[in-house]
Image (tube, grey):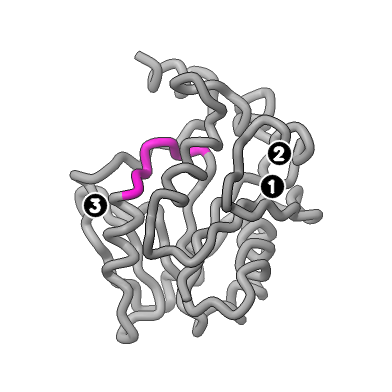
């Protein structure tokens, strides 16, 4: 079983407001990430991790078949969000993780990472012209290690110590994330 996990719990401090709600192409920024995950038939479910402004975000986006969960420890950083998301996927074999502030990670890029899952590597990562990015797929073999993560680094340090298969997806999407209003404006142009 393979479950998508969208991390969207941050407060958007650098953005100045909840960036999940910032409009891009007529919908909230987070909607792009949710819709991309839901468009991947190989996923058995999608979990969306909310935190800061969870009620406002939940009221603004359409989850459809995705399951929203609220990370009570969101202020700790990305590790708390990842722990919450992986904890919410039950007995899934793989968690395919994307970020709610990356609107151009496409269903095709997610599907390519899913197609690259292999028992030989406990993690599979999207590559954009050779540079690692999201989505990142984590096997059940790593879930206990995810539960031990702390801080704002997510799984980066953990992945440095395991075999990670890189799947090139540069032609299928873009890894651009939005952290500031200026970055959002640049995407609009």
Residue matched to label 2: 58
Tell me the tag on residue 50: 1
**Is label 3 in a helix, a strand or a loop?**
loop
Q: Main secondary structure of the magenta part?
A: loop
Please tell me whether mark 1 or mark 2 is closer to you in this view.
2
Q: Which of the two labelled residues, at mark 3 and mark 1, occupies the earlier sequence position?
A: 1
> Looking at the picture, does residue 119 appear above or below residue 39?
below
Q: Is residue 10 left or right of residue 44?
A: right
The residue shown at (76%, 36%) is 53
User: Local crowd at mark 3 within 10 Å, few (<14), some, or many (≥20)?
Assistant: many
User: Local crowd at mark 2 within 10 Å, few (<14), some, or many (≥20)?
Assistant: some
Q: Is residue 104 magenta?
A: yes
Q: Are marks 1 and 2 in contact (CB under 8 Å)?
A: yes
Q: Is residue 108 left or right of residue 85?
A: left
User: Local crowd at mark 1 within 10 Å, few (<14), some, or many (≥20)?
Assistant: many
Q: Quadrant of the C terminus?
A: top left
The residue shown at (34%, 80%) is 121
Residue matched to label 3: 169
Where does the image place residue 54, in percent across and percent down from the top left? Answer: 75, 41
Write the start and end of the magenta stretch as one range.
101-107
């Amino acid at each position: 079983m393979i479950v998508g996990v969208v991390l969207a719990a941050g407060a958007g401090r650098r953005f100045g407001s909840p960036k999940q709600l910032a409009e891009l192409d007529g919908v909230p920024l987070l909607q792009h990430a949710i819709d991309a995950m839901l468009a991947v038939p190989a996923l058995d479910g999608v979990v969306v991790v909310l935190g800061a402004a969870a009620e406002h975000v939940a009221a603004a986006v359409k989850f459809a078949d995705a399951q929203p969960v609220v990370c009570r420890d969101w202020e700790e950083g990305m590790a708390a969000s990842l722990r919450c998301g992986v904890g919410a996927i039950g007995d899934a074999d793989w968690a395919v993780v994307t970020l709610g502030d990356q609107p151009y990670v496409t269903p095709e890029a997610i599907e390519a990472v899913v197609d690259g899952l292999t028992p030989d590597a406990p993690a599979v990562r999207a590559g954009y012209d050779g540079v690692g990015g999201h989505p990142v797929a984590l096997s059940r073999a790593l879930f206990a290690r995810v539960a031990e993560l702390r801080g704002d680094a997510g799984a980066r340090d953990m992945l440095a110590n395991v075999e990670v298969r890189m799947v090139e997806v540069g032609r299928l999407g873009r890894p651009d994330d939005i952290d500031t209003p200026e970055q959002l404006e640049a995407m609009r142009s």
